[in-house]
Image (spheres, rainbow, N blue to C red):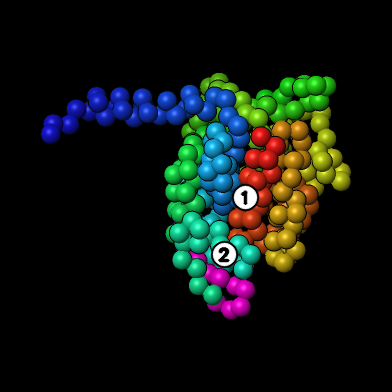
Amino acid sequence: MIIDERIVTEAIAGSFFEKFKSCIDLDVAIVGGGPSGLTAAWRLARAGRNVALFERKLSIGGGMWGGGMTWTSIVVQNEAKGILEEAGVAVSEYKPGYYTADSVAATAALAYQATKAGAHVFNCTSVEDVVLREVDGVRRVIGLVVNSSPVEIARLHVDPLVLHCRYAIECTGHDTEMLKTLVRKNDVKLNTPSGVIEGEQSMWADVAEANTVRYTQEVFPGVWVAGMAANATFGSYRMGPIFGGMLLSGVHVAEAIDALL
């Protein structure tokens, strides 16, 4: 077989832009490709929803890739180990209720399950703004403003593109980047005690793991928070390299939004 480089280029451009065009109107847009975002994408796509995940970095997976301190092991508790097992990840009981898994295998498995189910993943894509509309007298997020991450990094003056969605999930972790943009640029109040982002507190794994799921909810019309972003939004704690709450949060937000759709 003789390889024609032009056909290679045509194949990449054609297949990518077909994928991109299919995401101009989404059921759910997920911002951030960490474990909660990947799990939510997997479950929503499996439910038949048109879902896309946008990750600023070249690699998806968030903090899960690096395990704890670059040691490629993670911990999940009993309540969440079944999610990893369902994804095809081997887990081992270290002590009663504590299970270890390879961080690279876990991240790769979640990414594979999400894309296999039909979720569209766009890496190197930054969400620089949201689309805000008044719907039935209520201001609501109805889409995302996206750009190439290299454009953002180089600080080039290049206009973004716009995608619409019925719901957006803030999964950017500690930084709550999308939510901060929404609050900073618009006179809006969030569904938090203060009406703004409460901010993350220091390490308290036990409370943080429970609150990751507890605070997975709609924080502004059209916007849900999940994973570490939920804790940061509602002023809870960080938990380190135990990822059960992240996985459970991803499942919870997917099930809740799927029920609304």
Tell which of 74 and 76 is nearer to you: 76
Is residue 256 visible to the viewer in this orientation of the structure?
Answer: yes
Residue positioned 48% across, 43% down in the render: 117
Image x and y of residue 53, in percent:
54, 38
Q: Is 206 on the left-hand or right-hand side of 71?
A: right
Q: Please report whichever mark, 1 or 2, sits nearer to the chain's N-terminal start.
A: 2
Residue positioned 45% across, 59% down in the render: 88
Q: Which mark is residue 250?
A: 1
- Amino acid type, callout 2: Lys
- Amino acid type, callout 1: Gly
User: Is 101 within the magenta?
Assistant: yes
Identify the image quadrant of residue 203: bottom right
Q: Secondary structure beneath disc 2?
A: helix
Within 10 angstroms of label 2, few (less than 14), some, or many (20 or more) residues? many
Image x and y of residue 122, in percent:
49, 36
User: Is 246 within the magenta?
Assistant: no
As drawn, the residue found furthest toward the bottom would be 95
Please say if the residues under marks 1 and 2 sit with CB atoms less than 8 Å apart: no
Is residue 69 visible to the viewer in this orientation of the structure?
Answer: no
Residue that mark 2 sits on: 81
Image x and y of residue 233, in percent:
75, 47
Q: Secondary structure beneath disc 1?
A: helix
Residue positioned 75% across, 28% down in the render: 140
Q: Which mark is residue 114?
A: none
Gap between marks 1 and 2 measured at Cα: 14 Å
Q: Main secondary structure of the magenta part?
A: strand
Tell which of 129 and 89 is nearer to you: 89
Instruction: Check the picture and name the quadrant holding the N terminus.
Output: top left
Q: Magenta stretch?
A: 94-104
- Residue 237 versus residue 160 in the image, above or below: below
Q: Is 178 on the left-hand or right-hand side of 1?
A: right
Image x and y of residue 37, in percent:
58, 46
